[in-house]
């Protein structure tokens, strides 16, 4: 796996530990003797590598029993450098296993279990990050104790294990508990608010009037008008002067010609102009003229007889 991708995964994993389980900087990194031995033999800068892997400041710790195991192996080649580094750069964590009570150093598995889980209920009480190179010890911590970030060195590379199944179960359990607690608290708050409002209404007897008065007293803050810069400007109306001229003409005709003769002529001229045709003169038919002449002769004869 590329280094950048692995670093992103480690950062995401530590963020989950921080958000869900309360891990904080500086991270307390509890190591065993084999982890220190592998780091010194690989000539690794332990502080820098831990800081870059966990993406935060760290504090390296070792128990008294682990130091006693290193002292018991002081004649082996390379262990002297490990002891010197542990004396100068690593902080001691008291485990309570004194030499007077335990002439021989206690096994690192039992010692680290007692430090990480002192009450033996399967919980990482002090939120240790464990740097363990012993596979048996690492598997026992992975399966026996919840929420334990595990580190180990392989081929001069510091590797961080993904979250164990016990850690995932603990996270899901905590999330469900938080969700149910929020639901219960919200329901209780609503019931209390309803009870308080009912009591106030019963005591006062004027709950509705008080609410109405409160609504009246509320004043709107700020202007409720729209922003004038965001509004569209009003368009100016174009005045049609031809209509005004027609109105003026009709008014003058009405004043000068109350009978309406000129208006009829003007209307006819307008219709003629609007249609675009010339007005034709209508001629009287011959039948109408003959009827008129016959009528005149009959009138003349009747007057003569009389």
Image (cartoon, rainbow, N blue to C red):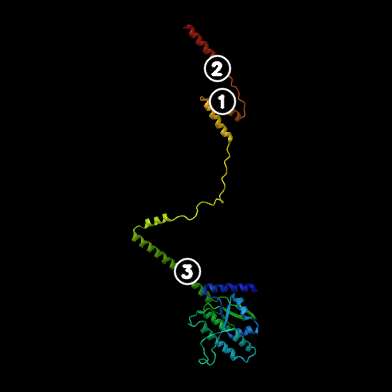
| C-beta proximity under 8 Å, tags 3 and 2 | no
The residue that label 2 is drawn on is 288
Residue 52 drawn above or below residue 262 = below
Q: Secondary structure at mark 2?
A: helix
Q: Secondary structure at mark 3?
A: helix
Q: Is residue 279 left or right of residue 182?
A: right
Asked whether 171 or 26 is in front, the reply is 26
Tell me if mark 2 has few (under 14), some (14-19) or many (20+) residues whose alpha carbon lies within 10 angstroms of its own. few
State which tag comes first along the sequence, 1 or 3. Answer: 3
Asked whether 156 or 297 is in front, the reply is 156
| C-beta proximity under 8 Å, tags 1 and 3 | no
CA distance separating discs 1 and 3: 92 Å
Residue 288 drawn above or below residue 268 = above
The residue that label 1 is drawn on is 265
Please name the residue shown 57% across and 88% down the image: 67
**Badge nearest the viewer, 1 or 3:** 1
Q: Classify residue 293 by image quadrant.
A: top right
In percent of width and height, residue 277 lies at 62, 27
Tell me if mark 3 has few (under 14), some (14-19) or many (20+) residues whose alpha carbon lies within 10 angstroms of its own. few
CA distance separating discs 3 and 2: 108 Å
Please name the residue shown 51% across and 9% down the image: 300
Q: Secondary structure at mark 1?
A: helix
In percent of width and height, residue 215 lies at 42, 55
């Amino acid at each position: 796996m590329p280094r950048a991708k692995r670093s992103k995964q480690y950062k995401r994993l530590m963020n989950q530990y921080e958000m869900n389980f309360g891990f904080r900087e500086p991270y307390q990194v509890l190591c065993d003797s084999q982890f220190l031995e592998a780091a010194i033999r690989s000539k690794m800068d332990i502080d820098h590598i831990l800081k870059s892997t966990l993406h935060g400041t760290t504090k390296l710790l070792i128990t008294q029993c682990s130091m006693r195991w290193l002292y018991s192996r002081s004649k082996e080649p390379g262990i002297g450098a490990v002891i010197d580094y542990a004396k100068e750069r690593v902080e001691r964590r008291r485990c309570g296993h004194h030499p007077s009570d335990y002439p021989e150093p206690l096994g690192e598995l039992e010692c680290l279990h007692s430090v990480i889980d002192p009450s033996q209920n399967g919980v990482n009480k002090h939120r240790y990050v464990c740097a363990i190179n012993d596979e048996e010890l690492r598997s026992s911590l992975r399966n026996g104790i919840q929420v334990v970030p595990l580190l180990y060195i392989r081929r001069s590379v510091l590797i961080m294990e993904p979250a164990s199944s016990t850690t995932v179960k603990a996270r899901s359990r905590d999330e469900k508990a938080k969700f149910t607690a929020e639901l219960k608290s919200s329901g209780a708050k609503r019931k209390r608010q309803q009870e308080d409002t009912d009591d106030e209404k019963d005591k006062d007897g004027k709950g509705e009037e008080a609410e109405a008065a409160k609504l009246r007293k509320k004043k709107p803050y700020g202007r409720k008008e729209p922003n004038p810069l965001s509004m569209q400007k009003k368009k100016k109306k174009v005045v049609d002067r031809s209509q005004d001229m027609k109105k003026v003409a009709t008014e003058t005709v009405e004043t000068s010609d109350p009978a309406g003769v000129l208006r009829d002529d003007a209307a006819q001229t307008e219709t003629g102009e609007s249609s675009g045709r010339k007005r034709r003169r209508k001629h009287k038919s011959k039948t109408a003229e003959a009827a008129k002449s016959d009528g005149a002769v009959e009138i003349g004869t009747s007057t003569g007889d009389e």
